[in-house]
């Protein structure tokens, strides 16, 4: 509207000036047709340069500047950019593309896209589209790339633009991550083997003497009780012996978990039995228990007792984390081909110093904890082709997420 207003004002002023100057320029003998022709010629001669100076010239300079700016941005972009026609012939490229392909721009322009990226389709069903393919450098070396192809907005000819990203470094980083994960798993397997050897020695060197000592304490405590002598010290010794036995048994279970019988069972049944076991403890400790599970049975394959042991351990840990009371939540949901069991509490959460080593042997936040319970839980989950992860909740407290595969016939 501003340009239109300037044009109208300019034409009006020019026309007025021509009308005033016309009587002095045109001879009086010239007829009306001649006067009109002279008027039009003068108007054109005056308006054309004025419009060029006022409107067309500035607009042209702006267009040239924008074009140069766009070319500068494309030329200096970190991503490789190529334009090509519908036949696949490369029309232009930026500096990053020549560095990526290791070829001069003059040699690259005119080649076909399939020579640079052999797997790129000749025809595209729809654009924009992305592909993960291998590109070929001038020396024949292949490397992974991600190619984004879209239509290039041009009125002169139909073109397409391809943005190429080198995936070499990202794939190296992913490979390093996988290597580290395998090394961590190998280290954990080595720890398990060491623990198995240690557990065997502990079983022979400690368990049998502890049993003998416990039996002697029990016999002597009974004699003292019959004779009316105090037995408090012996009861304390017996309790400590039982605690040592539990530690030894936990170590043995961690190193060599028992192999259960695999059967199909509804996960809701294991949840129901576990809730019955901890219901009294929750009421005693002022912990509100919330259980949500779908009605249709979700069938899993495994050992019911082991899954129940896993859930019981997680829920007892949650109760221990809330000595002053709180809320314990157990949620069962189905996600695609898996069933997800989430145990959450409203306690103080997991310490950041322990979070990364949560399932490592002998790592515990309890004063009298052995630090093997969560490791046993993860072993049980993995033996059922599942996974167990722990984290802190944003609202406060800890959360453990158990994932188990469903039986295919489960609905």
Image (cartoon, helix red, strand yellow):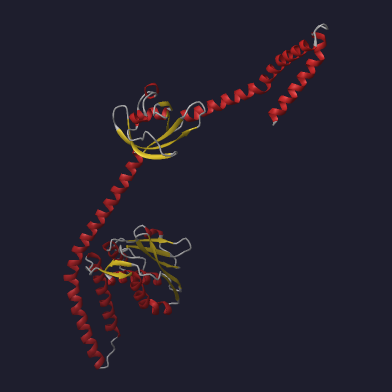
Q: Toward which corner of the image does residue 290 lie, by quadrant?
A: bottom left
Judge whether 57 appears above or below 258 on screen.
Answer: above
Which residue does the image show at 72% across and 26% down from the upper left? 6
Q: Position of residue 272 (x, y in %)?
A: 36, 75
- The residue furthest left is 204
Q: Is residue 247 above or below residue 21?
A: below
Identify the image quadrant of the N terminus.
Answer: top right
Image quadrant where residue 347 sits: bottom left
In the rendered view, does 286 fall on the left or right side of 19?
left
* Residue in the image at 35% along x and 67% along y: 298
Residue 64 on image: x %, y %: 56, 24
Judge from the rendering whether residue 252 lies leftward or rightward of residue 281; answer left or right. left
Residue 374, compared with residue 233, is above or below; it is: above
Residue situated in front as seen by the camera: 169 or 35: 35
* 81 over 278 or under it: above or below: above
Question: Looking at the picture, how far across and down is residue 404, in whole percent?
Answer: 32, 63
Q: Is residue 130 left or right of residue 307?
A: right
Image point (68%, 20%), residue name: 51
As rendered, which of 66 and 289 lies closer to the eye?
66
Q: Residue furthest bottom?
A: 227
Q: Quadrant of the C terminus?
A: bottom left
Number of labels in the image equals 0
Q: Where in the figure is residue 288, as x and y percent of width and height?
A: 45, 74
Residue name at image x 39 percent, y 78 percent: 279
Nearer to us in this view, 278 or 268:
268
């Amino acid at each position: 509207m501003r340009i239109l207003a300037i044009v109208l004002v300019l034409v009006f002023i020019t026309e007025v000036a021509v009308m005033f100057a016309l009587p002095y320029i045109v001879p009086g003998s010239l007829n009306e047709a001649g006067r009109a022709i002279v008027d039009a010629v003068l108007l054109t001669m005056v308006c054309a340069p004025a419009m060029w100076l006022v409107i067309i010239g500035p607009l042209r300079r702006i267009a040239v500047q924008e074009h140069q700016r766009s070319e500068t941005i494309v030329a200096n972009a970190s991503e490789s950019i190529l334009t090509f026609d519908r036949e696949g012939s490369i029309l232009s490229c930026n500096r990053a593309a020549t560095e990526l392909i290791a070829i001069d721009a003059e040699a690259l322009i005119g080649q076909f896209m399939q020579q640079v990226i052999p797997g790129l389709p000749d025809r595209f069903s729809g654009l924009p589209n992305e592909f993960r393919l291998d590109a070929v450098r001038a020396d024949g070396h292949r490397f992974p790339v991600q190619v984004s192809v879209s239509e290039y907005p041009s009125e002169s000819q139909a073109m397409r633009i391809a943005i190429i990203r080198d995936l070499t470094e990202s794939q190296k980083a992913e490979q390093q991550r996988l290597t580290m994960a395998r090394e961590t798993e190998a280290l954990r397997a080595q720890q398990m083997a060491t623990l198995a050897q240690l557990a065997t020695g502990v079983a022979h060197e400690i368990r049998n003497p502890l049993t003998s000592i416990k039996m002697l304490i029990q016999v002597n405590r009974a004699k003292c009780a019959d004779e009316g002598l105090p037995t408090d010290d012996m009861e304390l010794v017996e309790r400590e012996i039982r605690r040592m036995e539990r530690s030894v048994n936990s170590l043995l279970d961690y190193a060599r978990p028992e192999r259960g019988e695999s059967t199909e069972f509804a996960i809701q049944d294991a949840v129901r039995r576990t809730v019955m076991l901890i219901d009294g403890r929750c009421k005693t400790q002022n912990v509100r228990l919330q259980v949500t599970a779908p009605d249709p049975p979700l069938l899993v394959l495994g050992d019911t007792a082991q899954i129940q042991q896993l859930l019981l351990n997680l829920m007892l840990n949650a109760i221990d984390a809330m000595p002053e009371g709180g809320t314990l939540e157990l949620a069962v949901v189905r996600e695609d081909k898996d069933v997800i069991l989430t145990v959450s509490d409203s306690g103080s959460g997991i310490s950041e110093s322990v979070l990364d080593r949560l399932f490592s042997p002998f790592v515990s936040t309890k004063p009298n904890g052995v630090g093997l319970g969560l490791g046993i839980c993860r072993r049980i989950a993995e033996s059922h082709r599942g996974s167990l992860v722990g984290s802190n909740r944003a609202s406060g407290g800890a959360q453990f997420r158990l994932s188990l595969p469903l039986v295919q016939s489960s609905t």
